[in-house]
Amino acid sequence: MRTYDNPVIGGFHPDPSVCSVGDDYYLVCSSFEYVPGLPLFHSKDLVHWQQIGNVLDRPEQLPLPLPGTMASRGLYAPTIRHHDGRFWVINTNVSGGGHFIVTAERPEGPWSDPVWLDLPGIDPDLAWEEDGTCWVAFTVPGIHIARVDPVKGEVLEGPFPIWSGTGLLYPEAPHLYRIGDWWYLLIAEGGTERGHAVSVARARSPRGPWEGAPGNPVLTHSATDRPIQSTGHADLVTAPDGTWWMVLLATRPRGYTPKFQVLGRETFLTPVEWDDNGWPVVGPVLERHPAPAGAWHPFPVRSARDDFDEPALAPHWISPYARPDASWSLAERPGWLTLTATGPTLDRPGYTFVGHRQQHHECRAAALLDPGSGRGGLSVRMDEAHHYDLEAGDGEVSVVARIGPLRQTVARRQVPPGPLTLTVTVRTTDIISPSPEFTGIEPTGPDTIAFWIGDPDAPGAVPLAELEGRYLSTEVATGFTGRVIGMYTTRGTVAFDWFDYEPVPSA
């Protein structure tokens, strides 16, 4: 029997929502303060996913005003649906405008400008009755619904409350489905941390009354020792063979207690069965599962190296808050990505940064850059108060650690002028329990981040510093995102000939 490995989309890809059109599946995730907004994926088998774009790829679609937008603000949980021959995405911009709807004839776009809805809350969902009546379900707190005109953005009825869950913390992330003679309401509860859970209710009409499943929550890994934690914020989809599947977010904490998750909330896949009383049954989410039946459709593996030879940046490249046209170019120096400073520091929003989500616990990122008279390099970022920087400029390379209110240069090395290779490596230091002779200085965090001049596997590489990774984790930095490893400049223009990101097998 064929199997697949979880997560199916690794790294900071939270709040997945999925829809099917024929034999194709489309999935969208939250992006918070990063632009372009809402990464969009395509699959033919629910297991292999390829990013085909971003739903919000124009500045006019995505207002993230500065000052005012903070890390882990911006775009919260989206829902994607296909109805009446069009793709629909509803989402919340908590930093500018609230709920909005965008549509497209093709998932690759172009997507429309937002149609705004005068409704409170977060986590909106779209569902249609057979007569075309459209409902938006959302979190206020508690789950509410309103009848809307999704084309004009008009609220026609409501909003009114329908269900408050089972009593767990933060009932949120509603999705409505018409299945047989019932309407089902799938929600998240327990908070998006270790108590995260999935619960379900049903009714004969979206207006209710709603009854909860007797086995709620239908899925949670709370208070277990499973390597996958924080299971929740789910969406349902059917395969062509009639089987049901759930996409959901979860985390993979590492290190000594309380453990630390550094990749953000990732997208997982798990099967769904239905009991004799018509309630969904979901088993634990495993690291390896039997795969959905049908043809296997892997996509060509994306090259680990981007040589910046294309006329546009690939859709997986993201920037915090904005990416002004004047801040980057692929044409100014053909075959190079040139970045021009828009701010003097990574400690405050408004800087130039183009990054790649860290998607593996063991990985390496490297770039060949020419600092010229500028200053820039590679940064491992959680937010403005939590990042490690490997920086070149003024004839030296330095390693700078920003941890909360503290900023310190931990290493310096003189280098000759001209292009040079900078490398960041991440290796896990997962420890189940301290040794009997524990001294208090053994590595108990999730990983170690090392900084190099040159290629660590080649002669002449210079190791500069090793820093513990716990300070770039959600448990320390807080928030809803994961690590992003990126290229940046804080002075002048810095040119990057290539960027290479690849997983490194565990030793």
Image (tube, rainbow, N blue to C red):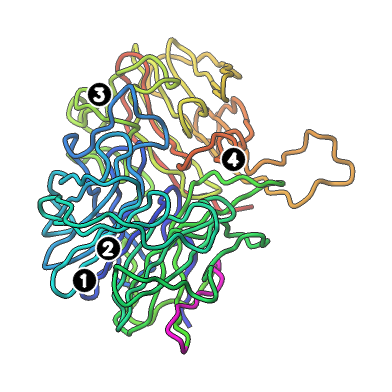
Q: CA distance from mark 2 to mark 3?
A: 32 Å
**Amino acid marked by disc 3:** Ser
Q: CA distance from mark 2 to mark 1?
A: 8 Å
Check contact, mark 2 vs mark 1: CB within 8 A. Answer: yes
Query: Is 303 placed above or below 70 here?
Result: below
Q: Residues within 10 Å of mark 2 (few under 14, many from 20)?
A: many
Q: Marks 4/1: CA distance?
A: 38 Å
The residue that label 3 is drawn on is: 327
Q: Are marks 4 and 1 in contact (CB under 8 Å)?
A: no
Q: Answer with the quarter of the image where residue 96 lies.
A: top left
- Distance between the Cα atoms at labels 2 and 4? 31 Å
Residue displayed at 56% across by 39% down? 473
For marks 2 and 4 on the same chain, the one whose residue lies earlier in the sequence: 2
Residue 224, label in figure:
none
Residue 475 is labelled as 4
Q: Residues within 10 Å of mark 3 (few under 14, many from 20)?
A: some
Q: Magenta part of the protein: which range?
A: 276-287
